[in-house]
Each structure stands twice: as structure tokens, then as C-alpha cells.
Image (cartoon, grey):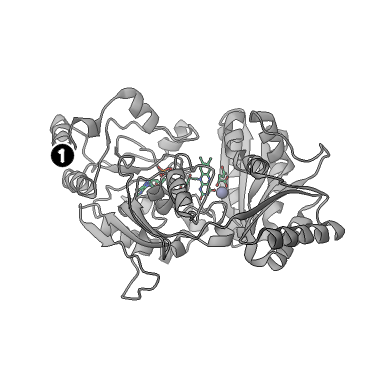
Amino acid sequence: FGSLAAKVQRNPSFSTLNSDDISYFKEILGEKGVIEDEDWLATANTDWMHKYKGSSKLLLQPRSTEEVSQILKYCNSRCLAVVPQGGNTGLVGGSVPVFDEVIVNMSLMNNIISFDKVSGILVCEGGCILENLIAFLDNQGFIMPLDLGAKGSCQIGGNVSTNAGGLRLVRYGSLHGNVLGLEVVLADGNVIDMLGTLRKDNTGYDLKHLFIGSEGSLGIVTKVSILTPPKLFSVNVAFLACSDYFSCQKLLMEAKRKLGEILSAFEFLDSKSLDLVLNRLDGVRNPLPPTMHKFYILIETTGSDETYDRQKLEGFLLHAMEAGLISDGALAQDINQASSFWRIREGIPEALMKAGAVYKYDLSLPVEKMYDLVEEMRTRLSDSANVVGYGHLGDGNLHLNISTAQYDDGILTQIEPFVYEWTSKHRGSISAEHGLGLMKANEIFYSKPTATVSLMASIKKMLDPKGILNPYKVLPHSLSS
Ligand code: FAD
Ligand code: 2HG
Ligand code: ZN
């Protein structure tokens, strides 16, 4: 992976850290908030996939918005580049330094500020871990409107900054709809209070949307206000097999129409994804008899009436079986079985990690075209790689993953730019939910016109004139320094 960093040059206008800088940070954060420990830094410099590696010498842990503001004000005046870091579960090389950027780690800003049981509006700090928020809300009878496999480590500030999609977007929509307000700190240390808790507020431009999905390039998210739905107690999960991709599509159309308001997830995986999970993860087993099916679908329903919901789902499954859309299936009988079905789907990234090197593509495509790409890629790569396709079919989001023993530039040239050109030709997006980070900063033009990218670069210039916030990420390198 050395070649990734080789493609970008360190921006020479950035300063390098000196002992006065360290002393200043110790003054504002105390000794404990200033980390120079080598092991700690080695972890923080490396991303979840072990694919991107920076060489930062300093990690800072602010405990308040005021401290974030003081850090950024100082870094801006000294021209020190900064990487905001949440749970470091990002998949596009956005959360780790490229060179020696200072890491601003948000873990200590993990307080819940308020929760309104009438409206379901939660206000918390950006460093709260998603799973902790889910547990807090569970006690109150509510849920988070987003859920993802990385919930045990990822933080709400990271989720907002990547506009994470996840497993329940099909039901609750994106963070652009659920986030009601944000507090952010700009590159110069200015604190922007957009922390509204209102469903409706049309007073001028809704600037918080600029920060949702900006991947730490425009500001650091210090507080989030988010609308949470009530927890409904009737949850059913089915794990189904389909013999061809056309049946998966028909099943999706039928599920939307027939399950309607209770549909809360519609996820898909191909047989190669299932094989990987079964072979690589301990304690995971196939809920269906070991017949070879080409595709698997996980359907979840969430509602308020157990008898009605179960009948509705069973009726739907019977109809789908009779119509030949599903060739086999299992309906979870209890909560343990339901989570074992989810483990199969959520475990795919981990299984891929264990299998060796992996090239990840996170694409929005028209559903009817989506799987053609997986098959074309298999033909291109023949036996040199294991090509798997899975994802959020209900949202038109394919995760195309190409697994090999080790990273190899020869294989990469077979994949790129082909995969981006194919996506662009079908008017898809080269980043459905993971963002652009370092990996795809230079590829943005496959999904966005030049004039739009120029406007983005102007906004970046206005909010962060020295370019200190998460440099080399999101925008093409030709426009960002
Ligand atoms: P990080 O990885 O630390 O950072 C991600 C980006 O956000 C970086 O650019 C960073 O600079 C910036 N950032 C982080 N915190 C802040 C902050 N407070 N202010 C400003 N910028 C910040 N993604 C999905 O969309 N859907 C999924 O279903 C999904 N599943 C995943 C499953 C697994 C197993 C893994 C490893 C990842 C998955 N992801 C998924 C990707 C990733 O987890 C999400 O993008 C997550 O939202 C990142 O949160 P984080 O706190 O780990 O952020
Ligand atoms: C998922 O849906 C995540 O499991 C990760 O978005 C996808 O690893 C991937 O490609
Ligand atoms: Zn995903």
C-alpha cells in the first residue's frame, strides 16, 4: 500500500511540530490529553483495514468544545495540519493521517447532553460510541435511526461526518433527514452553533447539511442533535435464498409493496459472501440446508403488533415461495436466532479482512444493473481474486469487494478505472455511503460535474483557507492545496 501515499506529496506549506507546540497543547489539555506514546500512535496512524498508514507524532484528546476550538485556532495560526478521528472504522483512508498531521481524537467527548422523551430528540457529544447511544435509548424505549456493523467502535460524530447509511436506511432514511442540529468547530477555532432541536426551521440556508458527509474537511463535529424513533417490540427476521438475481429484485419490489410500513431492512449477499463468513468467522452457521443457492436476502420487519406483523410476513413469504421468488428460507424463532442471521450479514467485512487484502467499492447503481458489474469483474479477474457482492439492496447500494492474498498493483489496474467508468456510465455513485477519503479524492469527477467540484473547492477555501482540516482527502489533489 506504499503506492497510495506515493501518489500525494506532503503540502510544503504545512509546518512540522516542535517542542513549543507540544508545550502549548499540554497547557490547554493537560499532560493526559497529549499523547506521544508510540504504540498508541501506531494504532491511530493505521486504518481498520490496515491499508492506510500515516506517520503522525501527536494525538490530542480534547474534553470539550472549548478545547477543540483552542486546538484548531492554534493549529490554524501555526499552519499545522489536522485529522479529526472518531472510532477509526472508516473504509476509505479518511480517518488516518497521510503524513504527519496532528490527530484530534474525539473519544473523551462522549457525554449525552439531553433526551426528550416526547419528541425523541437526543442531543449528545460527537465522541459518543453508536452502540452506547443505542443502549441508552433502549432504556428509554427508543432506537437510533441508524445501525451498522461497526457500532461497537464508530462514533456519532464520525457517522455524521461520513453521512453513514447502514442497515436501516431503507426504513428511517439518511442522516440528512434525521440530524436536526450540529455544533461544529471551524478550522480557525470559531464555534458554529447550529444545534437546533426543531423538526421545522426554514430560517435561511440550512448549513448543517454542509458538514453531514464532509468527512472532517470543513469542521469538527462536537455536538449532534438527532431525531430517534420509538422502539417497536415486534421484530421479525427472515433469511432467504434466491436462485437468480432477477428474483432478488422482484422480491424487493414485492417486499416494499406488501410489507410496506413494517419493512425495516432488505439486505443481500451472494453465495461467495456467505462462504467467506462461514469459513472465516467462528460460530457462524448457515441457517439453511447446505444446498447451493446463488443469492441470499435478509429481511427484517419492525412493527407494533406481534400477531399482525408475523401473519403479514408469513403471508408474504408464502406468496413469494409460491411465485418461485425464493427457493428456501428460515424465519427466526427467537431473538438469538435473529441476531445469528444478522451476524452473517454484518460479519462480511470482518470475514474479508481475515481472508487477506481487500479492494472495496461502495457503489450506488440502478438495482437491475447492479449484479452485472460483479459478474463482469469476475470475468476480468478470472482466478486471480475472489469477487464478492453484497449490500443494501433496498437502497440500491452494492458493496463490491475483491479479495486477494496480498495487495498487488497488477490486480489494481485490472479493477480501476474500469469499476469507476462502469459506475459513471450507468449514472451511479462511486461512493454510496463510505465517502471519498484518500482513496477516491481524485476520482470525484466520475460522479460529480466539474462546476460542482469547483464550488465544493470554493466552500472549502472559504471555511478552511489554509487547508489544515483533513488534507489530501475528499477533494481532488489538484484543487485542494
Ligand atoms: P472515523 O473512521 O474515525 O472517521 C471517518 C471520517 O470522519 C474521517 O474522514 C474523519 O476525519 C471524520 N471524522 C470522524 N469524527 C469526526 C468528527 N467528530 N468531526 C469531524 N470529522 C470527523 N458505513 C456505512 O455507511 N454503512 C455501513 O453499514 C457501514 N458498516 C461498516 C461495518 C464495518 C465492520 C466497518 C469497519 C465500517 C463500516 N462502515 C459503514 C464505515 C464506517 O464505520 C462508518 O463510515 C462510520 O460512520 C465511521 O465512524 P467513525 O467514528 O469510525 O469515524
Ligand atoms: C456494510 O454494509 C459496510 O457491511 C461495509 O458498509 C461494506 O466492507 C464493505 O465493503
Ligand atoms: Zn454498507
Q: Is residue 117 left or right of residue 222?
A: right
Question: Which element type, helix, strand or loop, lies under badge 1?
Answer: helix
- Callout 1: few (<14), some (14-19), or many (20+) C-alpha neighbours within 10 Å? some
Q: Nearer the viewer, residue 300 or 267?
A: 300
Q: Is residue 41 above or below residue 425?
A: above
Which percent across, then down, holds residue 291?
Answer: 83, 39
Residue at left 82%, top 40%? 292
| Residue at the top extreme, as displayed | 38
Residue 202 visible within the image: yes
Which percent across, then down, holds residue 155?
Answer: 41, 45
Q: Is residue 371 left or right of residue 356?
A: right
Q: Is residue 253 above or below residue 290?
A: below
Residue at left 60%, top 56%? 423
Which percent across, then down, holds residue 322?
Answer: 87, 59
Q: Is residue 308 left or right of residue 78?
A: right
Residue at left 35%, top 73%? 201
The residue singled out by tag 1 in the image is: 28
Q: Is residue 40 above or below residue 266?
A: above
Residue at left 60%, top 59%? 395
Q: Amino acid at mark 1?
A: Ile
